[in-house]
Image (tube, rainbow, N blue to C red):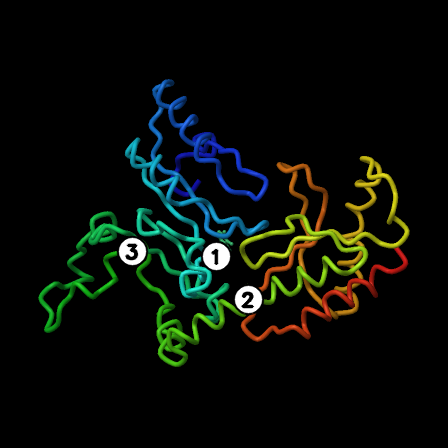
């Protein structure tokens, strides 16, 4: 939209049940476009999708993109934190083959909001694209190496030093500390999911998920043990908003719910474990509080 290409130029590629883009479908869509005389320019992969937390298969997508000379961008805004952890880095295998990557360090990686990085694989590209060499602003003949000046490399001129807090954080806690923050998010998610599997009334949308998104339905007692007809699901779709209203009024919790129409899912709760300070007692509270708020529905 911002580049003026228009949404009609965006092609949706089917995903599997976990939410990962299907590489073979991507290739077929590229071939179709080429046949129609269109120019496939860029593939938008995601590492940690917003709702389901799916990690696209970067290796397979990179193979397709290489075959057709298409730019591969990776939206790792949410899931990029995995790169900091020895345990979870495999989720982003082949990330070095992407051409660009967006990563919000204020999400899973523990930095205060906002601290977002846009990384490009090709050195000097930002200058080539954005540099205007306005002589009244950016002088090249200074007493230091001006290649470090970022003023002429981005579309913004005035800006905050968003990288400083990341630098300070990383300096303070080290690689191990950064990994611990990320591992804690993943661990909390797994703990919460396990607990929900063992608690009546909770049903995970994706029982074996990869990221730190816990998506689930809560089924109140009055709706348990019934045939799951479209009418039943209609009733379930109203449970999320009802419980959410109660938690907001009480001020006890805050979490989002969403439908996922493309997968045929009605409203479900979606908890994103991104807080470095959350622990198991918080996860226990989530379960007991939802039970308390939804008991009489
Ligand atoms: C949060 C998020 C974004 C948006 O990031 P902003 O820096 O807030 O614009 C983009 N993509 C994904 C997958 C996200 O989770």
Residue labelled 1 has its Cβ within 8 Å of some atom of ligand 1 = yes
Residue at the spot 78% in from the left edge and 63% down from the top edge: 290
Q: Which residue reaches farthest bottom?
A: 172
What x and y, as percent, mark residue 58? Answer: 40, 45
Distance CA(mark 2)–CA(mark 1): 11 Å
Nearer the camera: disc 3 or disc 2:
2
Label 3: how many residues lie within 10 Å, few (<14), some (14-19) or many (20+)?
A: few
Whether label 1 touches label 3, CB < 8 Å: no
Residue at the spot 35% in from the left edge and 42% down from the top edge: 72
Q: Judge left or right: residue 246 versus residue 158.
A: right
Nearer the camera: disc 1 or disc 3:
1
Q: Which mark, by number, is residue 35?
A: none
Secondary structure category for the residue under label 3? loop
What x and y, as percent, mark residue 210? Answer: 54, 54
Residue labelled 2 has its Cβ within 8 Å of some atom of ligand 1 = no
Whether label 3 touches label 2, CB < 8 Å: no
Please say if 237 is above or below 87: above
Q: Which mark, by number, is residue 79?
A: 1
Numbered disc total: 3
Dividing the picture into quadrants, the one containing residue 235 is top right
* Viewer-side residue, 52 vs 38: 52
Q: Judge left or right: residue 232 versus residue 136.
A: right
Please say if 283 is above or below 33: below
Residue at the spot 72% in from the left edge and 57% down from the top edge: 197
Residue beneath label 3, please?
154
Residue beneath label 2, please?
185
Distance CA(mark 3)–CA(mark 2): 32 Å
Q: Earlier in the sequence, mark 3 or mark 2?
A: 3
């Amino acid at each position: 939209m911002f580049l003026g290409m228009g949404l009609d130029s965006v092609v949706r590629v089917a995903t599997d049940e976990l939410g990962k883009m299907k590489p073979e479908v991507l290739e077929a869509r590229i071939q179709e476009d080429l046949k129609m005389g269109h120019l496939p320019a860029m593939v938008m992969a995601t590492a940690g999708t917003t709702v389901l937390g799916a990690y696209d298969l970067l290796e397979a997508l990179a193979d397709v993109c290489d075959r057709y000379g298409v730019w591969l961008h990776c939206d790792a805004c949410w899931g990029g934190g995995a790169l900091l952890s020895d345990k979870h880095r495999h989720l982003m295998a082949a990330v070095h083959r992407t051409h660009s990557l967006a990563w919000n360090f204020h999400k899973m990686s523990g930095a205060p909001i906002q601290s977002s990085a846009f990384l490009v694989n090709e050195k000097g590209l930002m200058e080539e694209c954005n540099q205007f060499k306005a002589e009244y602003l950016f002088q090249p003949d200074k007493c230091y190496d001006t290649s470090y000046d970022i003023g002429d490399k981005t579309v913004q001129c005035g800006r905050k030093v968003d990288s400083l807090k990341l630098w300070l954080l990383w300096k303070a806690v080290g690689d191990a500390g950064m990994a611990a923050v990320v591992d804690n998010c993943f661990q909390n998610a797994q703990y919460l999911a396990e607990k929900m599997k063992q608690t009546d009334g909770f049903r995970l949308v994706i029982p074996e998920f990869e990221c730190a998104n816990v998506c689930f339905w809560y089924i109140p007692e009055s709706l348990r043990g019934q045939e799951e007809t479209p009418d039943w699901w209609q009733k379930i779709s109203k449970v999320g908003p009802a419980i959410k209203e109660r938690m907001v009024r009480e001020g006890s919790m805050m979490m989002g719910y969403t439908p996922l129409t493309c997968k045929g899912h009605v409203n479900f709760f979606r908890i994103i474990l991104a807080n470095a300070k959350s622990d198991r007692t918080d996860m226990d509270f989530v379960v007991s509080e939802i039970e308390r708020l939804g008991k009489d529905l």
